[in-house]
Image (cartoon, rainbow, N blue to C red):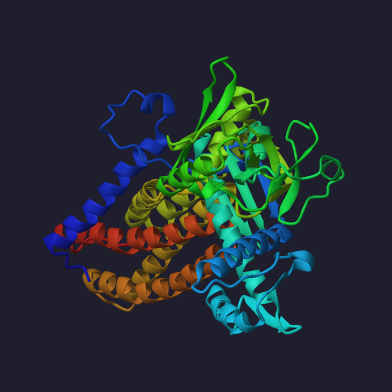
Amino acid sequence: MLDFPRWKVGLVWTAIAFCLLLSIPSMVPEGMRAKWPGWIPQPTVNLGLDLAGGSYILLEADTADVANTRLEAMREIVSVEMRRGNPRVEIGDISTRDGRLTFMVRDSSRVDAARERLLPMTAGAGLTGQRDWDIQVVDTNRFVLTPTRAGIQQAIDTAMNDAREIVGKRIDAMGTREPSIIRQGSNRIVVEVPGLQNPEALKALLGRTARLEFKLVDIAANPEDVAQGRAPIGSQVLPYASGGGNIAVKRSTIISGDQIADARQTYDQNGQPDVTLTFNGEGGRRFARVTQENAGKPFAIIVDNQVISAPNINEPILGGSATISGGGFTAQSANELAIALRSGRLPVRLGVIEESTISPELGADSIQSGIVAGIVGTALIVLLMLIAYMRFGVYANIALVVNVLMIIGIMALLNSTLTLPGIAGFVLTIGAAVDANVLINERIREELRRGRSNTAAIEFGYKEASRAIFDANVTNVIAAAIMFVFGAGPVKGFAVVLTIGIVTSVFTAVTFTRLMVANWLKTRPKALVI
């Protein structure tokens, strides 16, 4: 075990040098790093919320909103598919009362054809063996489509995963650094943004669903009925965002947020903030066709079920863009809406149910306490190793310093975030690294007492102790992996640092110290070992 080919020696020193170089930016003040040339990479370890300070927000999804959105989407699909086929299936108005879709097939002979068209619209709900919609025919020609429990649960799970990604895009667009966005349970999302001390803008942005819709205004609706919240069949009543009463709009959507390619905050000719939309190819063509067919009619621009404005279509709009104005925007609110539309609409409404702000001073105190604990613990360990093992204690202490720097370098390479529990994991790995050296050194002493030569004692000491070291650390890695998979936030931070520390401590305590001992033993094979 004491023979090191040149390639292995080169590999060990290359790995150490690489990690040490990666660790340097994390130990240099940010102001000094800013003066470095741009071509020098600067991977650094990010500080978590409990160390850097910042904002914590717990979001909860309105699962009923998922069911309603899914119901409306299915209503639109059924309406289109029944008209699209040849021959066409004539149906009556589609009702969405009581969380179910119901409609009548006017020609009873077309019931089987209607069912054949409905079946492809349903799908299996995961591995449950159920379909996401239950289709029934009652009273000979009336269809009832009921969402199954498995289908709703699958829709909620998909919506929460999509919502997590969109929340991340919106936070990134604000220019914040290294947010932590984690699902908690089936309908909650934990958001931690280090360095953000005023979370109000973030709350407003994350709480906005940004469900954009363009719909035609129902000009035939009775104003008195609309004022009382009643709409004709096929229409719905929505309020103005400015609080100026209600308006009746058609249920069918002309353009949705999914067909937006870009959204930017701009100013109109009077210097008032507005939002300019650019449609994708499909959205541009559809908007052009609808405005050509409905010239002279008003249409409503709706965001989150509130009408921002209802301009008149004076002429066909063929440019593939539109402007949202008249919503009483400020520059900030227009920019927030543009970010929300650009990042995509949330598939489910999110509400803030818990929030807290951690000051940077508290984080600085935590860092200071962690540094003091680490320095005191390391100093005591270094002193103990020197007293107990002399030269081999020196090798163990060198390996300990290299181990710490390698952990920092690997964390910087992985863009990991260091939390307060992560500092605890840091200190724990220092103890684990020294523990491995203690096992090796005590085993070498035991072999020397048995009368073995220096070379044989060191070789057997490393060989026999390495088995126990590897077995113990495999168990620790399994425990860390379980914490990472099932934990959240700080627990994951602890697991990451612990896992990295276990790997580097085994490398430095076993391989690196063995390399140093082997080089020394070649020059002084008869010297006193321990």
Report the residue at 63% width, 32% height from top.
Answer: 311
Instruction: Indicate the position of residue 458 as horizontal and vertical percent values.
Output: 28, 69
Q: Nearer the viewer, residue 91 or 404?
A: 91
Instruction: Indicate the position of residue 331 as horizontal and vertical percent values.
Output: 59, 23
Q: Can you say which quadrant of the picture contains the N terminus?
A: bottom left
Left or right of residue 70, residue 13 in this image: left
Residue, far top: 270
Q: Is residue 509 above or below residue 133?
A: above
Instruction: Indicate the position of residue 492 as horizontal and vertical percent values.
Output: 55, 57
Q: Can you say which quadrant of the picture contains the C terminus?
A: bottom left
Q: Is residue 14 above or below residue 436?
A: above
Report the residue at 42% width, 34% height from top.
Answer: 319
Q: Can the viewer see residue 185 in this picture?
A: yes
Q: Quadrant of residue 9?
A: bottom left
Q: Quadrant of residue 309?
A: top right
Instruction: Indicate the position of residue 195 as horizontal and vertical percent values.
Output: 57, 34
Q: Can the viewer see residue 524 in this picture?
A: no
Left or right of residue 446, residue 353 in this image: right
Report the residue at 35% width, 53% height from top.
Answer: 399
Q: Nearer the viewer, residue 494 or 103?
A: 103
Q: How many marks?
A: 0
Q: Is residue 7 above or below residue 284?
A: below
Residue, far left: 6
Left or right of residue 406, residue 157 in this image: right
Left or right of residue 466, residue 18 in this image: left
